[in-house]
Image (cartoon, rainbow, N blue to C red):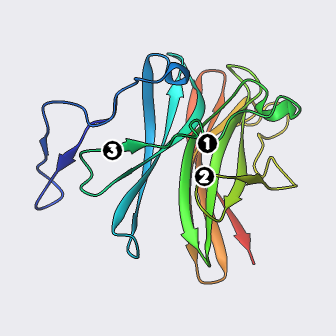
Amino acid sequence: VIGYAWSRDGIFWERLEEPVVVPDCTWEKRSLMCPTILWDQKKEIYKLWYCGGGWFEPDAIGYAESKDGIVWEKCGKNPVFTPDKKNLWERAHVAGCQVIQMDGWYYMFYIGYEDLFKARICLARSEDGICWERHPNNPIITGGQFGAWDVEAVCRPAAVHLKNKWICYYTGCARKNHRIGALIHEE
């Protein structure tokens, strides 16, 4: 489920007692997680992308809109982003997205799962936030070579655009160890 909390100072938070988005569609199975929200100034609505599916890792990405951040209307085309079985790096699941709006496009950094233990970071873009096209050079971030700290999986992307570069923070995994790394892409 996805909850709602607010704060006046960013330190002390109050929560709504009930979740604001619950799994009520077949594709969502029993769990929702990994929300990313943007405010659309022009339409005056919140836009939510979230993951739904299995217990260990979700299966696909859905979309919903809200005027107040509490009552959400799910997209009738959900899930809006599913694994492309032709791509080895995402044949099992897609999840954990972060969506950024820039230059008239929505850019989605997402995790593509080959299986439960092998994950890579990929990129897609959309004009409406619902119909997505994958970057032709996916995956954009893969784990290191044998013995590297991120050899098994890279996941949980958090990308930031600053002037002429992108910085993508991510979690790397190897031998049950999780560490945070960052990559810089100069434009």
Identify the residue at horizontal 19%, vertical 45% (top origin): 5
Secondary structure of the residue carrying tag 3 is loop
Q: Quadrant of residue 38?
A: bottom left
Residue 34 coordinates in the image, percent (x, y): 46, 38
Report how many numbered discs are placed on residues in the image.
Answer: 3
Q: Earlier in the sequence, mark 1 or mark 3?
A: 3
Residue 141 coordinates in the image, percent (x, y): 75, 49
Identify which amino acid the numbered label 3 is placed on: Trp
Which quadrant of the figure contains the N terminus?
top left
Q: Using the image, tell me which numbered label, if any, was put on residue 72.
A: 3
Q: Quadrant of residue 10?
A: bottom left
Location of residue 126 with respect to 23 vertically, above or below: below
Crowd rating for badge 2 (residues with CA inside 10 Å; few <14, some 14–19, many 20+): some
Question: To which residue does mark 2 refer?
Answer: 130
Q: Do callouts 1 and 2 mark residues in contact (Cβ within 8 Å)?
A: yes
Identify which amino acid the numbered label 2 is placed on: Ile
Q: 67 or 120: nearer the eye?
A: 67
Q: Earlier in the sequence, mark 1 or mark 2?
A: 1
Crowd rating for badge 1 (residues with CA inside 10 Å; few <14, some 14–19, many 20+): some
Residue 57 coordinates in the image, percent (x, y): 56, 23
Question: To which residue does mark 1 refer?
Answer: 80
**C-alpha distance separating marks 1 and 2:** 6 Å
Secondary structure of the residue carrying tag 1 is loop
**C-alpha distance separating marks 1 and 3:** 16 Å
Q: 60 or 15: nearer the eye?
A: 60
Which quadrant of the figure contains the C terminus?
bottom right
Location of residue 163 with respect to 73 vertically, above or below: below
